[in-house]
Amino acid sequence: MSKVVSYKDIGLVNSRELFRHAVAGGYAIPAYNFNNLEQLQAIVIACAETRSPVIMQVSKGARNYANETMLRYMAMGAVEMAREIGVDLPIVLHLDHGDSFELCKSCIDSGFSSVMIDGSHLPYDENVALTSKVVEYAHQYDVTVEGELGVLAGIEDEVVAEESTYTQPDEVEDFVQKTGVDSLAISIGTSHGAFKFKLKEGESAPPLRFDILEEIEKRIPGFPIVLHGASSVVPAYVELINQYGGKLDGAVGVSEDQLRRAAKSAVCKINIDSDGRLAVTAKVREFLVKNPGEFDPRKYLGAARSELVELIKHKNQAVLGSAGKA
Ligand code: G3H
Ligand code: 13P
Ligand code: ZN
């Protein structure tokens, strides 16, 4: 990348105003991960139809998979597509789990309007130093920055945490003040992926640690909080996958009730990746088993995309409360 591209020229927005409205209005902005065309189309169609502001997010892995230039043009296409549908949708292009200053800078220089620098696995002072460096660069271009305190159980890109280390409320005020971040991801019992809780027969998932969230809110009132690992691992998709040849034993996620409660609080960004992956996999598996003679990717990926549209509309309307806010 030689030339610096401003997200403003692409028609994107940063997350600042969206979060301000979400915190005041008691809802959360959805942050959907994407890696390919059909996922991105589904996000645009569903968010336009429900008039929901949206954060389209890209992980380091997604950038490697799809190619960074291709992804940037896809995001530009998404903005144009929403306009053609006739909705002036506020769209944020966000780097999910940035793991270095260089990666964040590269995204900012290529048109991202928001980045996450995830120093949550580092010693506190190093997290502060790295996050501050990214904020200093990003704010020169009016790009918003998400930091993280506390480690989620499971796999955060290449960082493996055996158990979730909950965010310590005593650290948040100092972190926010020293780094200048625009939002803060916290750890209150969620984890990434489709296996969020190890449950015995008949057990249900433990509630999130809303007591920790309340303590955090007391320390930084009105500050935008981000919830990662927030897929519900929709049981109907897990059942379809298993019915059509897959094997996902013990997959379980965060209940919609818990997410609704979080969305009404200072949590103003909710990250969803696994549910989209499950919806796509379930529909592709079902389609191919039911239509053994089909080999046109448009047919099975089209079926997956339609399901993804329905899933995202449901999340915006019934879980996050972002529908109608664009
Ligand atoms: O939090 C991680 C996201 O689900 C992205 O996952 O690194 O496999 O693209 P990925
Ligand atoms: P899920 O794995 O629960 O979808 O979480 C996604 C996420 O937090 C992306 O950053
Ligand atoms: Zn995450």
Image (tube, rainbow, N blue to C red):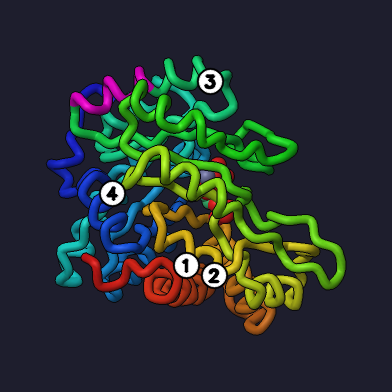
Question: Residue 62's spot in the image, x, y percent?
Answer: 48, 43
The answer to whether residue 36 of the structure is visible from this angle is no
Q: Secondary structure at mark 1?
A: helix
Q: Amino acid at mark 3?
A: Tyr
Q: Which mark is residue 260?
A: 1
Q: Is residue 31 above or below residue 98?
A: below
Q: Residue at x 31, y 36 (%)?
A: 182
* Residue ID at (67%, 41%): 164
Is the CB atom of the residue marked by disc 1 within 8 angstroms of ligand 2's nearest atom?
A: no
Decide which of tag 2 and tag 4 comes sooner along the chain.
4
Which label lies toward us, 4 or 3?
A: 3
**Along the viewing direction, whichever of 312 and 225 lies nearer the viewer:** 225
Determine whether label 2 and label 3 are within 8 Å by CB. no
Q: Nearer the viewer, residue 136 or 194?
A: 136
Q: Are marks 2 and 1 in contact (CB under 8 Å)?
A: yes
Q: Amino acid at mark 1?
A: Arg
Residue type, numbered disc 4 = Val
Q: What x and y, as percent, mark residue 98?
A: 45, 32
Question: CA separation, marks 2 and 1?
Answer: 6 Å
Question: Looking at the figure, which quarter contains the N terminus?
Answer: top left
For mark 2, what is the residue? 256
Vertical side of 24 occupied by 87: above or below: below
The amino acid type found where label 2 is placed reads Glu
Residue designated by label 4: 92
Label 2 and label 4: CA atoms lie apart by 24 Å
| Residue at 51% from the left image edge and 71% from the top image edge | 304
| CA distance for labels 2 and 3 | 32 Å
Image coordinates of residue 103 in percent, x first then y, are 41, 26
Regarding mark 3 in the picture, which secondary structure is present there? helix
Q: Quadrant of residue 153?
A: top right
Which segment did they paint magenta? 132-140
